[in-house]
Amino acid sequence: MNGSDGVRAEEHPGGTPPVPPADEHTRVETAAQRTGPSGLRLRIAELRNLGLLGVLALLILAGSLTRPAEFLAYDNVVVILTLASVSGVITVGMTFVIIGGGIDLSVGAIVALATVWATTKATQMYGTGGVVFCALAVGVGCGLVNGLIIAYGRIVAFIVTIAMLASARGLAINISSGHTQTLNADNQTLVNLGYKDAFVFGKIPPLVIMFALVVGIGWVVLNRTTFGRRTFAIGGNPEAARLAGLNVRLHTLLLYVLSGLCCGVASLMLIVLTGSGTSANGNLYELDAIAAVIIGGTLLTGGRGTLVGSVLGVLVFTTISDIFTLNNLTTATQQVAKGVIIVIAVLVQRLVAERRAGGDPG
Amino acid sequence: MPEPPLLVMRGIVKEFPGVRALDGVDLEVRPGEVHCLLGQNGAGKSTLVKVLTGAHQPDSGDIVWRGDQTPQLTSPTAALRLGVATIYQELDLVAGLSVATNIFLGHERSAFGFSRRGEMNHAARELLGRLGHPEISPGAEVGRLSAAARQIVSMARALSYDARLIVMDEPSAALAHDEVTNLFRVIRQLTAAGVAVIYISHRLEEIREVGDRVTVLKDGRTVAAGLPARTTPTAMLVAHMTGRAYEYVFPPRPQANEGAPEILRVEGLTLPGVFRDLTFSVRAGEIVGLAGLVGAGRSEILETVYGARRPSAGRVVLEGRELRGGSVVAAVRAGMGLAPEERKSQGLLLLDTVAGNVSVASLRRYSRLGWLDRRRELADARRQTRALDIRPDDPRRPIRTLSGGNQQKALLARWLLKGCRLLLLDEPTRGVDVGARAELYALIRRLADSGVGIVLVSSEIPEVLGLADRVLVIREGRVLRESDARELDEHQVLDLVMEGSNR
């Protein structure tokens, strides 16, 4: 992004900052960097994720106690991680959007549209490359439309993405006439990725590696790039960010494009898993993704959050689903449990946050 | 024998961390009078009103209300029930509800939990009629009414509580000329019925027209009480308002450099309804101050020059290059920086660290293909925070834990790091305690000495006069006078901004 601007940063008119640097201080800072309250903050942030890790550990314990034979079996772990991969990739995009002060309710519908569009007969004529390109392009395209209307049409994200939710799924139903479209014999490359033969080292499904890759890239972008830093700034205080000279609109647009791209990747994963595309795909994915982001400790109002927390959130939800399924409990019961967990998680976070605020030296 | 006063406040003291907002205020209000409160920004008028209406509790002092030595002014609602009502500048009405609902909000007429709409509409109509505005329908939606009509609804609400005293804080600020006339008529009707009004305004001509007596506040103290509103000479009122209990320490001005290059030129800039055809320039190393009352359009001028508002006409030229109007990105890239009026809501990233706040405008410099060089970023931020002596000395602290003065310094550090050519400072010392102010003044002057052009807006006239090289006196979006700061004094500026209204 902003590639054309990058050069100009060096030629800012002032040359060096007007206030003379205090040279005698600069040497001390390496020592100062390692200590001080910032180190403490880091520990607390980790602690918050530790809480989620604890929940995950409890769940694993519960799973192994109730279904000792099945839960920790290799096949079951693969199932959990594979399912987590699909919603996890979407959650990565959602984390960016929410930290940036927005919300994307259309992710599930975009996934549906992308799987359908990528599996039409017309698309399949272009081979596997065509399918891949189409899924990603639909995701990016929908994100672009969302972003343009939100950032430049200045309509709130909630409304815009709800409209996209309705129309993208409608379009998916239209295109597929409500049928499930399977990949034809020429396009089985994608489907083969789902088989054990394709597992890396014979153990790890490619989808899980893909998920890990997306999380890794996402983490770097969020925590180590100017794009990530700007995302936090814009989500935390859009007016201050604007007055500091950040291009808030362009950045907002890019956040929704990023979310759309993640949906495109997730829809490819679904195509790999099912060998087909249907307008029923991705139902309620938006709620799962938002819930995972929130229990991961990201502020719904933006400006603060972690990607690691979101990923843990996804793992918690997928593990719960798995345990419930193994114990023959209905999806209805799962939904209730999910709801309870969301509320408890947010309550605990608030208590932690309040304690933090109370203990702050300022 | 004069009738007993409605309200007596004596020796009211209210302290906030770092500032004594009220330092012994006396006020006496008689039934049926319009009592005007006069004072500069920061003199304590708003705090006094908040004490009176129960929003703040005084630290010491006595309040006697209608003979009651210990009135329970514990909250705005409690004050309202005792008969003290306030009409705020920002009217506290619910826009989506009807006139009648707003009037009876909080004390609805009801029977068995069902609101008696007919009775409320009837009562509302009667109140509006008493205020001389029967044309306002009780069923109308408040959001669709004019500012003047909304004010009437506020007053009807006050009357519905049987208010004996109505506090009006700058009621004319949002009103057009004929609406002000109307407001005065309503005020006279109220006072004729024995209701007292505390009227706060900066416009002397209004005070002369509607007021009975004037109390002048300065630095949290009553300096003159109960002056006759119509006959006290303006010079005397201004004299009471000016002159400070404490002295500001301003850095010395360097020799004016006529040959310094022009950094900013603003030509014919117009923002409809706020200011028009504004022309001025700033040279390198010069501090230009904009003096005027709140609402005179000062902040809007800065924001328009900065591109945060889109002008309808005119141009902004920075170092010879014309800027695209209405683009902050273009202004910042060209070398402008703004420390906005509302530090917390417009300036700071409160969730971020000091370093994050300092570097946010310069991120590109630390970016290599988007990758952020965090070590260099932190080192540079640290250099700035040390140079400005921001405390505590740890750029990785959350910015919200810093004092107001240090937060303001962090905003300056942001633009120092960026290396800007023109700095726009909107109320840079608001909420900053007196000690830290001197430091900020010195810093601003040091910046100018390094060749940066500075435009300074402040509600405190001594600050503008003491710090700026050149001053533009602004009233209702027009420049009344432009002159060397040394050729103006506080009295002249106050006279200019308060008198000579076109009303």
Image (cartoon, coloured by chain):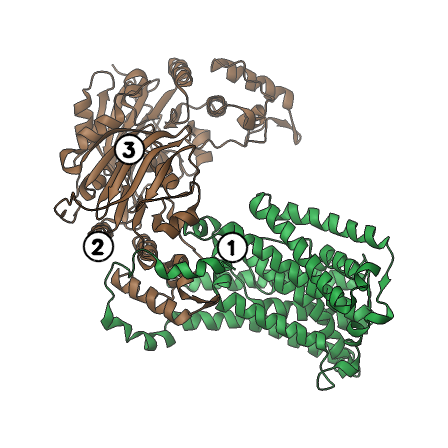
Figure colour of chain A: green
Left-right relation of A108 to B251: right
Q: Which mark is residue A235?
A: 1
Dot label at residue B292: 3
SS at mark 1 in the image: helix
- Residue B10 sits in which quadrant? top left
Place of residue B198 in the rendered image (x, y in percent of width and height, measured from the top left) = 34, 25
Q: CA distance from mark 3 to mark 1?
A: 35 Å
CA gap between label 2 and label 1 equals 35 Å
Check the picture and name the quadrant holding the C terminus of chain A. bottom left
Q: Camera-side residue: B161 or A311?
A: A311
Q: Secondary structure under badge 2?
A: loop
Near mark 2 (Cα within 10 A), the count class, few <14, some 14-19 or many ≥20, is some
Residue B485 visible, this orientation = yes
Q: Earlier in the sequence, mark 2 or mark 3?
A: 3
Label 2 in the same subunit as label 3: yes
- Labels 2 & 1 near each other (Cβ < 8 A): no
- The correct choice, above or below, for A305 with respect to B185 in the image is below
Hue of chain B?
brown
Q: Which mark is residue B450?
A: 2
Q: Is residue B223 left or right of residue B89?
A: left
Report the amino acid beneath label 3. Gly
* Chain assignment, label 2: B
Identified at 36% across, 59% down, the residue is: B358
- Amino acid found under the numbered disc labelled 2: Ser
Observer-nearest of A3 and B340: A3
Look at discs 2 and 3 and give the one toward the viewer.
Answer: 2
